[in-house]
Amino acid sequence: MSKTYKAAVIGAGSGGLTLAIGLAGFGHDIALIEAGKVGGDCTNVGCVPSKALLHAAAAGLDDPFGYVRAKRDELNRREDHEMVEHDQIDLIRGHGRLTGRSGPHVVEVTAPDGTVVEVSAEHVILCAGSRPVEFPIDGLDPARLLTNESIFDLTDVPSKIVLIGGGAISLEMATAFRDLGSEVEIVELQERLIGNDDPVVSSTIRAALETRGVRVHLGTSIERFDGTTAHLGNGARIDDVDKVLLAVGRTSRHADLGLDAAGVATYERGIVADSWGKTNVDKIWAVGDVTGNTLTTHGANSIGRRCIRAIALPLPNVGEPRVQANAVYSRPEIASVGITIDELDALPTTGRVRYEKQLGDIDRGFTDDREHGVVVVDAERFTGKILRAAIVGPGASEMIGMFTMMIDHGIGLRKLFGQVHPYPSYSQAIGLIADEFAGDTYRSLPREWLAMMRGRIARRLRR
Amino acid sequence: MSKTYKAAVIGAGSGGLTLAIGLAGFGHDIALIEAGKVGGDCTNVGCVPSKALLHAAAAGLDDPFGYVRAKRDELNRREDHEMVEHDQIDLIRGHGRLTGRSGPHVVEVTAPDGTVVEVSAEHVILCAGSRPVEFPIDGLDPARLLTNESIFDLTDVPSKIVLIGGGAISLEMATAFRDLGSEVEIVELQERLIGNDDPVVSSTIRAALETRGVRVHLGTSIERFDGTTAHLGNGARIDDVDKVLLAVGRTSRHADLGLDAAGVATYERGIVADSWGKTNVDKIWAVGDVTGNTLTTHGANSIGRRCIRAIALPLPNVGEPRVQANAVYSRPEIASVGITIDELDALPTTGRVRYEKQLGDIDRGFTDDREHGVVVVDAERFTGKILRAAIVGPGASEMIGMFTMMIDHGIGLRKLFGQVHPYPSYSQAIGLIADEFAGDTYRSLPREWLAMMRGRIARRLRR
């Protein structure tokens, strides 16, 4: 190969596409290497088909799975075509692997037909994504076992579907399959659903799903199948199981990338990379699921943009990454932003406050007879700066943007106080929390200030 | 009367309740005078029953109007009870009227039975609200004519309902009655729906409603009825009309408040009051619809809070009121914030930019097959500070909060650039607009800065 690209991007999912298109926009020649489908998990087996199924199911479309595949395939075709036609991007179909030859780096690409070509590039960016964690289940007919990679190829609505795992995928699929008319049961090893979020979120979404007829088994797992009967560790059984979705987590696709040859460091969740995508090897970068830092499309996109800046612009690498909200498009939706619940629990309680507002207690929740919905905010005392916020409710994925903005711009509940929210929107819950905060702290400003300072000192000592 | 209240509040709607409860919270004795129902229009004939009807209709409840009345009456009972039981508030039922006797001010209250009592108070706060503009329609059986004050007393779903006016009430009722199965036709004198919003909003909501089968007649009005047939000024006719909703606007209830006796100044839209509720007469205040400044519950609440501060706290009256977003709970929802469309049109085009993003062009719009939805932003060049923003789409009333926050805190599109929106939320349209803005202006920062400064100077010269 004579041509040396500015960058070879391995993987054309949301991270890889962001990087290829972004760097090409700066006039650079890019090799984009993809072993599977352009668009990656998001377009083909993740966000896009799942949102399409949620829509099709809620709207009662005649052929929901046909709709999902039409949407998925159309977007894949569109993205593939865009890459094929792009003047600055060469789409190379095959499996990319670092060779360890550097200066510039050389990537070996094995095409589906076994042909091997070498690609030279100044930078290599690893965006190989992740895949579902899989394990066999004793006694289960493999034809009944699905992951997010196979579920959207269903043609018939399962009579009963068991969802293993209580995270985002499971909650969205529980919503969609209930709408489609399936019986739905969730089996989660932890004692609560969506264990990486606030316990109040867990109990709220559980109640909402149960009200819709979803059965939830917590703190247990399926030990074995006997025909179509699942036997759970806690002694319970689920009869007449039609399909089983394995949705217990995702694992980085960093094996077989030639990382050892190139000397790229890894850890248990994937490739070690900082918030610019920088690995331990000069001009080798890693972005997205493959790093274990982010497991979302918007996360890969956000870090990808920083990586573009680091490669294409002569600017110093300063500035923190923007905070990344998470959303689950179940009904009701879930969204959260800020530090993790584990980080929150590790903080001293001095100097922080917590507010919780049930959506059923605000006027829109009243008119809409909303039983299950909540806004919960953990904030610094005195300033009310947001440590973490979570929402369960309609439009949560849109409402969370206000909290994201508050964190990005250092706007606390004290500064938020007085913001006018349209009546009767669910956002009024946020206004009411700011009111409560102001009411609680105005009464005793000096004491609150002292408590905050004590909290800040305690947090620093903990680090 | 021997007792002198801190304040006599005339009207127990959203403005009056805010003031009574707020001032009572500071330990003051309040007389709350209400001729009709506690809760005012919002609880009894406005936001609450309309949102309840939208919910009942969308959810397909068996007895939608029964649901609406149950919700409305429950909230009214609850608010009434709260006022009756409040230690610091005396709820006085009757029509309040200024007498002109002051120092302290004296209000004459005529009870429903004709009894007259006088109430003395240091401050009088006029929160008498508004009522629908009404006029007779030639040939129309009065039994078929409804306003927002009578529509929620319906017991049967009309076979065909004609909505006169193309504003918020009409768009919400069009949404609800289509869901209920009525044929719906809108007749609006202006050439577009929701004429106080962006023309792009008008065309988008029109297309969305027409797709759902609503017929829209613009630039015309009903000249007369012949039996159940409406004859329009443009020659069109609407046959078999069952009910007609008059929703052409609202007019301040400032007549018969004794304003002349007290010397309180009025103008064509109501009582003249500033953003603190201050009228031309010392210690007489006016808040909410009766001033014509705001015609929303959240507007009355926001100005009411400023009025509480002006009366109860020894602080100087400085600080601008917070910006007030508006929302229409049609499907799709509409929300907008910032300067009015007339103010925007009056600005020189130098120094400002406009971005428009169709929701069908973003990924969630694609998965959800969204034909009609848009985010439109007018902003200052260079900084991207928001002049006006409008959204048509699901969750618009929640999404608008980000723009409200941007205006309140001077965050422009340049500072917004990089905010991570959950994928695939509709809020991504806002992120894409910030991206486009950054792309457009980074290329030529000095020129953009100059254009902005020219625009600022031009705006100042126009004032």
Image: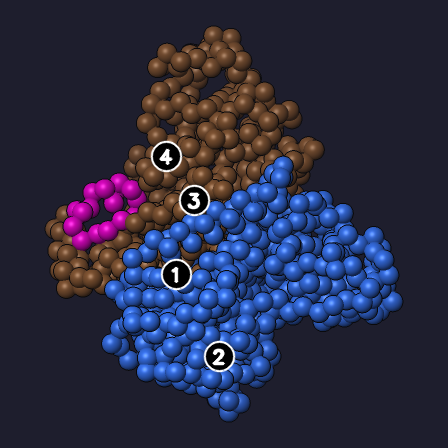
Chain colours: A blue, B brown
Discs 2, 3 touching: Cβ within 8 Å: no
Q: Amino acid at mark 1?
A: Leu
Q: Give the residue drawn at x 78%, y 69%.
A: A220
Choose between A370 and B25: the one closer to the eye.
Answer: A370
Against B112, is A96 above or below?
Answer: below
Q: Position of residue B444 (x, y in %)?
A: 17, 61
Which of the two marks, 1 or 4, is nearer to us in this view? Answer: 1
Q: Could you give the CA–CA distance between mark 2 and mark 1, rounded to whole angstroms?
A: 20 Å
Q: Could you give the CA–CA distance between mark 2 and mark 3, rounded to whole angstroms?
A: 41 Å
Choose between A422 and B28: the one closer to the eye.
Answer: A422
| Mark 2, residue position | A258
- The chain holding disc 2 is A
Q: Which mark is residue B203?
A: 4
Image quadrant where residue B48 sits: top right
Q: Amino acid at mark 3?
A: Gly
For mark 1, give the secondary structure: strand
Residue B351 shown in magenta? yes
Residues in magenta, as a range: B339-354
Q: Position of residue A181 (x, y in %)?
A: 72, 44
Callouts 4 and 2 on one subunit: no
Which of the two marks, 2 or 3, is nearer to us in this view? Answer: 2
- The chain holding disc 3 is B
Q: Position of residue A412 (x, y in %)?
A: 43, 70
Q: Position of residue A232 (x, y in %)?
A: 83, 66
The residue most toward the bottom is A461
| Mark 1, residue position | A91
For mark 4, give the secondary structure: helix
Q: Could you give the CA–CA distance between mark 1 and mark 4, rounded to whole angstroms?
A: 41 Å
